Image (spheres, rainbow, N blue to C red):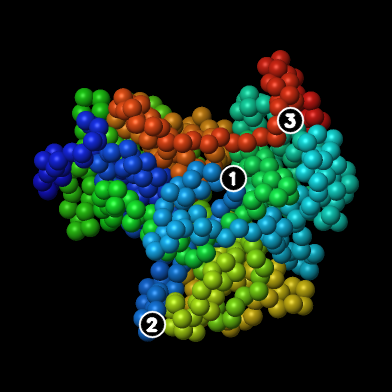
Amino acid sequence: MAATAGTAAAREPRRRNGPARNTVAVLGAGIGGLTAAHELAERGFEVTVFDRKELGGKSRTIPLPGTGVGGRAPLPGEHGARGFTSFYHHVHDTMRRIPLPGSRNTVYDNLIPFSVNDPRYPRAGNLPDGFPLMFGFYFDPRQALTPEGLQRILVEAILKNNLIPLPEAIHMAGRVVTYLTSSDERRFGQWEHLSWWDYVGAAQRSAQFQALAATGLTRALVAAKEYVASTRTMGNMMEAFFLALLQELAGGQKVYQVLNGPTNEAWLDPWISLLRVLGVRFLPGHALDGFEVASGEIGGVRIRKPDGSTAVHRADWYVCAVPTDRARQLWSPEMRGLAPSLARMDELDVDWMNGMQMFVSEKLELGAGYNIYLDAPWRLTSYSQRAFWDVDYAAKYGDGQIVDGLTIDIADWDTPGILFGKSAKHCTRTEIYQETWAQLTAALNDDGRIQLKEGIVRDWLLDPGISWQDGQNHNDEPLLVNTIGSWAARPTAHTEIPNLFLAADYVQTNFDLATMEGADEAGRTAVNALLEAAGSPAPRAQLFTRDAIPAFEPLRQMDAARFRAGQPNLFDLG
């Protein structure tokens, strides 16, 4: 084993004005890890960030190798159709603190907002394209401040699709009102343990109800699977989107946002540059191989270097920000004994949601928002990069012939497709491209209009985390999914091990979803726990809470009493 990094670190001078125990190893450079590093560095800690790959985690840009010609940059790939919303308060706060070199702007100014009315929902089979539920439907926000007014709005919005019968529209509106008037006690005690599919009673209703109210809504909100998604998670996101919609209709921020360029250029590169100025040291290509435990604490971490050798790095505090699947492999029996919350993580589920980019020779005209393909078996979502990027694409990227990029999320890797009859997990990379194209064109070219022309794709990129082995695909970067009852299996940011903290999206957070926002909140929560453990007088990182409709607060208080008495929600008619 190579000489330990800790010995050298011990000889380095402490940061001036920093706390007495101020060395921190941040393990993982995704949004959670970078957020923790940012907050700690601002408070005088000496931070080293390790990551087995590139900085940025699943949020990073993935250049397509060998495609930059004549001084142009390689074609910019992403993990999927990445977006933001007006209620991403932690991420927005972080972005506002990252200056853009050569200007008075911050990274936040690189967000391009678009309206809740801009996403499109292309249907296959010549069905009319539409908007599930209230999305795309405008109304006076004041009318939504009573359960009766909200129910009338929802029924009218649902019927706008002209595909769901009136009784089913009334039923769905009632389910929305039931959730919005439910107390936190009921949300955790009842709805956490019920799937969204069962909550809306999808099995007993029409195929169109299932497509729009069950499948469509879960895709529109969180790209989740309606059979396993916790109603509490789905309901909380529905509430957040609904509040954001009300704010937009009242003249506030638009609901959706997309960066005005590749994620690295628009966000991550300026962020990492700022952190370097703050003294953060980055070691990409350095993988966490395990923890060393001494006297009930973490005594060091084993780091595998790019050359394959291993060294032990020692610090005062350790912030683990690696994703769920890798973290569970790193918890040793000794750590699991010291921290039972780590052992409970074995009960958490991960799923696949990875991206593909198609680089095309004609500018796409697919609207100024997301396209959510309600009938695509692989649960596709896309947007065209040039709709948001104010750039001469051909001059900056690729070989000069490519003028736009179509960024696509593939959220279902288990359902057979329409071209080969195989799931994405059992398709080769080329078959995934061909099947994805077939599902896109089935929705976009089905009514006589040709929105995606054959022959325009000059190159494409599938997320390199997907690899083909032994007749099927494997995923090196799966995503945590909030399944029924999974909240209890998620640890808090401060583990039972005194100097070990967690800053990944599996941590129990107020936002409660595996997103950039959830990871940012987890990083801040880990830092606050570390500051508390260190006895630091430094100000705590700012945390934001979820909003609720204030007019419904008396009903939520009433519901808390009804739940404790074993009674259903006042509006719960089944």
Relative to 470, 515 lies left or right: right
The residue carrying mark 2 is 69
Q: Nearer the viewer, residue 164 or 560?
A: 560
In the rendered structure, which amino acid carries the disc numbered 2? Answer: Val
Relative to 29, 307 lies left or right: left
Residue located at (36% from left, 45% from top): 38
Residue located at (50% from left, 54% from top): 108
Q: What's the distance in space between the residues labelled 2 and 3, CA to CA?
A: 58 Å
In the rendered structure, which amino acid carries the disc numbered 3? Answer: Phe
Residue located at (23% from left, 50% from top): 304
Residue 495 to residue 395: above or below: above
Disc 2, disc 1: CB below 8 Å? no
How packed mark 2 is, by other alpha carbons closer than 10 Å (few <14, some 14-19, many 20 or more), is: some
Q: Earlier in the sequence, mark 2 or mark 1?
A: 2
How packed mark 3 is, by other alpha carbons closer than 10 Å (few <14, some 14-19, many 20 or more), is: some
Query: Residue 87 has which mark?
Result: 1
For mark 2, give the secondary structure: loop
Residue 266 appears at what percent x and percent y? 45, 61
The residue carrying mark 3 is 552
Q: Earlier in the sequence, mark 1 or mark 3?
A: 1
Q: Nearer the viewer, residue 355 or 144?
A: 144
Residue located at (38% from left, 61% from top): 101
Q: What's the distance in space between the residues labelled 1 and 3, CA to CA?
A: 19 Å
Residue 128 appears at what percent x and percent y? 80, 64
Q: Earlier in the sequence, mark 2 or mark 3?
A: 2
- The image quarter containing residue 143 is top right
In the rendered structure, which amino acid carries the disc numbered 1? Answer: Phe
Q: Nearer the viewer, residue 61 or 112?
A: 112
- Residue 206 seen in the current view: no
Residue 265 to residue 411: above or below: below
